[in-house]
Image: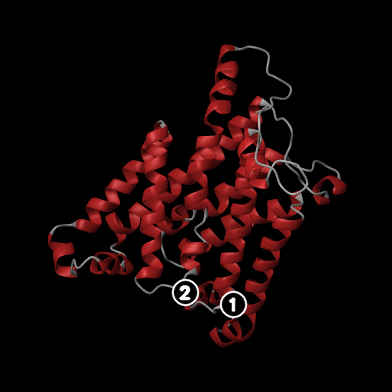
Amino acid sequence: MTTQTTGTTGRPSPWKRALTAPTLTKLYWLLRIGVAVEYLGHGWAGLSRSKAWLPYYDLFGISAQAATDYLMYLTGAFDITVGIIVLLWPARIVLLHATAWGVFTALLRPIVGEGWWEFLERGGNYGMPLALLAIVGLGGRSVRGWLTRADAPRAVSDKTWITAHWAARGGLALLLIGHGGFGAFEDKAFLYTFFDYFGIGRAAVQDNNLLVVFGIFEILLGIAVLIKPAKSLVIFILVWKVITELLRPLVGQPWFQFVERVGDYVLPPALLLIAAAYAVALARTRSGAPAAAAVAE
């Protein structure tokens, strides 16, 4: 007789159900939890009244005092609300907002003069909710369709697999290229603190062009993802991003800096989950074979 791990009700344990769930269900939950955590991190930053946000409020004529005393709390509370809604009732309209807001807030960086690398580095902020929205589909012309809870679909079309793959792949590539640009072209001051954590002083970093070396390395990683996201490459990137982003709190930056970049750690496993279904969908599309109306994975 075959035995299996069960809960008190005789059903398989939640952990076993998660491991044996269809690929599409795993991908859905990975992205859904990732988007929720992203917005909880954003909200945490707002409630912490991050001074880095002041130029964005100033762009709209809001004073630093008004932003600090009121608007940051409201923005933070709203982002946290979005995160909670995604966890409890992921309506398509909320996922659309999460995608659009991710693009908008990323665009604020170059608009206020921080450079386009800042926009690219936040590729996970908009690539991740876009991939989730692609999987659950749009609401169409129906208001009900946009407000209805978007649960994990049982099957999706070839086009959906390809769209979700490129949303994740593009987001991952952009965030790597953007972060690499910080060192290669912008000489970001906070990067020196990472080297200092390992006992490498500013003079040694500059003499050996370490910011440029590591910056170009990350840009090449991003380009490699665009060319061919091989499994070994994606796994390396996952480990690389977790370790390097963990340096932020280790050198004294607030923990929300690590949390709000959850897309950096979600998109690599998302790409791994999508890989097989994407390959099948792409091959079928290129061969001119009739597209499957719905493909379960």
**Sequence-earlier tag: 1 or 2:** 1
Determine whether the residue tagged by mark 1 lies in a helix, strand or loop. helix
Q: Is residue 230 above or below residue 172?
A: above
Determine whether the residue tagged by mark 2 lies in a helix, strand or loop. helix
Where residue 204 sits: x, y (%)?
Answer: 14, 64
Where residue 150 sits: x, y (%)?
Answer: 76, 46
The residue singled out by tag 1 in the image is 47
Q: Depth check: 36 or 73 in front?
A: 36
From the viewer's perspective, is 126 left or right of 201? right
Q: Is residue 123 visible?
A: no
The residue singled out by tag 2 in the image is 52
Real-space Cα distance between discs 1 and 2? 13 Å
Residue at 23% x, 54% y is: 212
Where residue 44 sits: x, y (%)?
Answer: 57, 72
Q: Amino acid at mark 1?
A: Leu
Q: Is residue 74 above or below residue 222?
A: below
Colour scheme of the rendered structure: secondary structure
Marks 1 and 2 in Cβ contact (< 8 Å):
no
Which quarter of the image is occupied by the C terminus?
Answer: top right
Where residue 96 sits: x, y (%)?
Answer: 69, 51
Q: Depth check: 95 or 6 in front?
A: 6
Residue at 44% x, 50% y is: 175
Q: Is residue 218 visible?
A: yes
- Crowding around mark 1 (Cα neighbors within 10 Å: few <14, some 14 to 19, many 20+) is many
Which quarter of the image is occupied by the N terminus?
Answer: top right
Q: Amino acid at mark 2?
A: Ala
Q: Which quadrant of the structure image shows residue 182?
A: bottom left
Residue at 40% x, 52% y is: 241
Q: Is residue 109 above or below residue 274?
A: below
Residue at 50% x, 77% y is: 50
